Image (cartoon, rainbow, N blue to C red):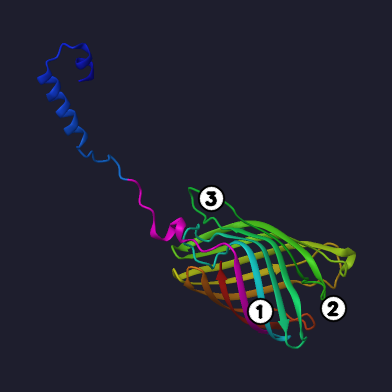
Amino acid sequence: YQKGKMAGKVTPEILSGLRKSLIRRSKIQIAESRAPPPIPKDNQPDLIHSPRLIAVTNGWNPEGHYFGINFRESLHDKLSRDSGYEQYSHLEAIDIHAGYYEQLGKWTLAKATVVDMLSLYPLSHLDPQLSWRFYLSYEPGYHSFPNEANEVIARGGIGYSYSLTASQLVYALALVSTGFNPSVHRGYYLGPGLEFGWLLSVHPNWKMEITGLFLQPVLPSITEEKLFHKYQFTQSWILSRDLELRAAFALYPNRQKDFELDQELSTRLLWHF
């Protein structure tokens, strides 16, 4: 049309007809050859919970009743709402716990975690990736009794995870753990460990897990350092996008009596903001 108009060799009637044809063609809706892939309703980025967290805890252990509060700067843990995150993802940074024990009558620093990362890749024949863990924290030492001193704890490891069903996953990791504490022999310890877990999503808003942790210092070699082991069962109920309720029951060794396990029961209310 434009070429004929500029050349001046086409009659006005033909140019008018070409112009009308172009206008009609511009109004025709052209169907897309391939529709865009739909976004799963449970994985939309706008549905993620807020990154920061504040939580209150009410619990009982051998030292008596306690009340706790903690603040976490970021980001997500494996028992929180999955919407917008990869399933089983876990990344926490700057997580500070403080507790008030009625028997002691004072507030204490329970734990200050710098980073806690757990990456679980379900094993498959097409994608046999390793799962891995890295943890760095300042907390009461596992092997500092009777001084009960805080120590810097670092541990990391690799292993495998496997999806039993679409809503269940099990994992096991071989660990290397170390602690730095002036109250223990030579001020440090180093040893192997094992971590395992079972995760179940009963419902998008109801999760539970069973975890186990074994740590055995071997360096420097002293007979007083015993195997530490802890088992925990946790349930999480997601009340809304930013609100959760959790209950946990834990077993761990008594520091003074061999072959005896202490028990701890706690409930937590978590708010993401």
Q: Which mark is residue 251?
A: 1
Q: Residues within 10 Å of mark 3 (few under 14, many from 20)?
A: few
Place of residue 189 in the rendered image (x, y in percent of width and height, measured from the top left):
82, 63
Quarter of the picture holding the N terminus = top left
Q: Which one is earlier in the sequence, the residue at label 2 or at label 1?
A: 2
Disc 3 residue type? Pro
- Above or below, 23 against 228 in this view is above
Of the numbered discs in the image, which one, if any, rests on residue 128?
3
Q: Which residue is at the front of the view, 164 or 79?
A: 79
> How many labels sit on residues?
3
The residue under label 2 is which amino acid type? Pro
Disc 2: which residue = 146
- Which region shows up in magenta? 36-60
Q: Which mark is residue 13?
A: none
Quarter of the rendering containing residue 170: bottom right
Question: Upstream in the sequence, badge 3 or badge 1?
Answer: 3
